[in-house]
Image: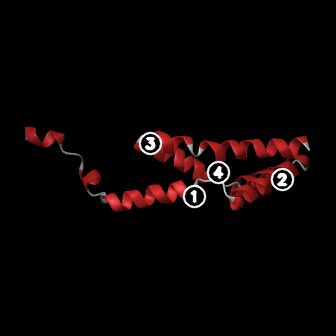
Amino acid sequence: MAGNNNRPPKWIRSIPRLTIEERRKIIADVQDDSKANFDYLILVALSSSIATLGLLSDSPAVIIGAMVVAPLMSPILAIGLATTTGAKIFSEMPCSPSLLARSCPLLFQCS
């Protein structure tokens, strides 16, 4: 009985484990998705313009719609993956798209 105290619970043991190749594929996919490309920039510009229109028209539904359009999930996933894996280089990369997404609405408000 004393030897079983170190075993994880049954529900944890039932979770399938990833192979090294599956882990590498997931890391590569998240890394590719978190880069700032043309589609990312267009979605950030579109979502910030929708949010600006929502603020001007005092419409919470339009502002929530802008949040749905915003492509901020990929950089957030990349930061989370970098935190759990401890990859320093990988954790620095998603900061630029995230900073870009935060600065784009400022450009729309200033113009």
Residue 43 x %, y %:
73, 58
Q: Which mark is residue 72?
A: 4
Taking the image as shown, residue 79 lies to the left or right of residue 37, namely left
Identify which residue, 29 or 84, lies in the foreground: 29
Amino acid type at mark 2: Ser
* Labels 3, 4: front one: 3
Does label 3 or label 1 sit earlier along the sequence?
A: 1
Q: Residues within 10 Å of mark 2 (few under 14, many from 20)?
A: some
Q: Residues within 10 Å of mark 1 (few under 14, many from 20)?
A: some
Distance from disc 1 to disc 4, alpha carbons, whole Å, reads 11 Å
- Amino acid on which the number 1 mark rests in the picture: Asp
User: Which residue is tagged 3?
Assistant: 87
Q: Amino acid at mark 3?
A: Ala
Residue visible at 71% across and 47% down?
101
Task: Identify the mark nearer the N-term, 4 or 2.
Answer: 2
Query: Can you say which quadrant of the picture contains the C terminus?
Result: top right
Q: With 96 as the anchor, is 4 left or right in this view?
A: left
Label 3 environment density (alpha carbons within 10 Å; few <14, some 14–19, many ≥20): few
Q: Position of residue 51 (x, y in %)?
A: 81, 50
Residue 67 image label: none
Q: Nearer the viewer, residue 49 or 100?
A: 100
Of the numbered discs 2 and 3, the one sitting upstream in the chain is 2
Q: CA distance from mark 4 to mark 2?
A: 15 Å
Query: Badge 1 is on which residue?
Result: 33
Between disc 3 and disc 4, whose residue precedes?
Answer: 4
At numbered mark 3, what does the secondary structure look like: helix, strand or loop?
loop
- Per the image, the residue denoted by label 2 is 49
Residue drawn at (58%, 53%), measured in percent from left and top? Answer: 34
Residue 66 visible in the current orientation: yes
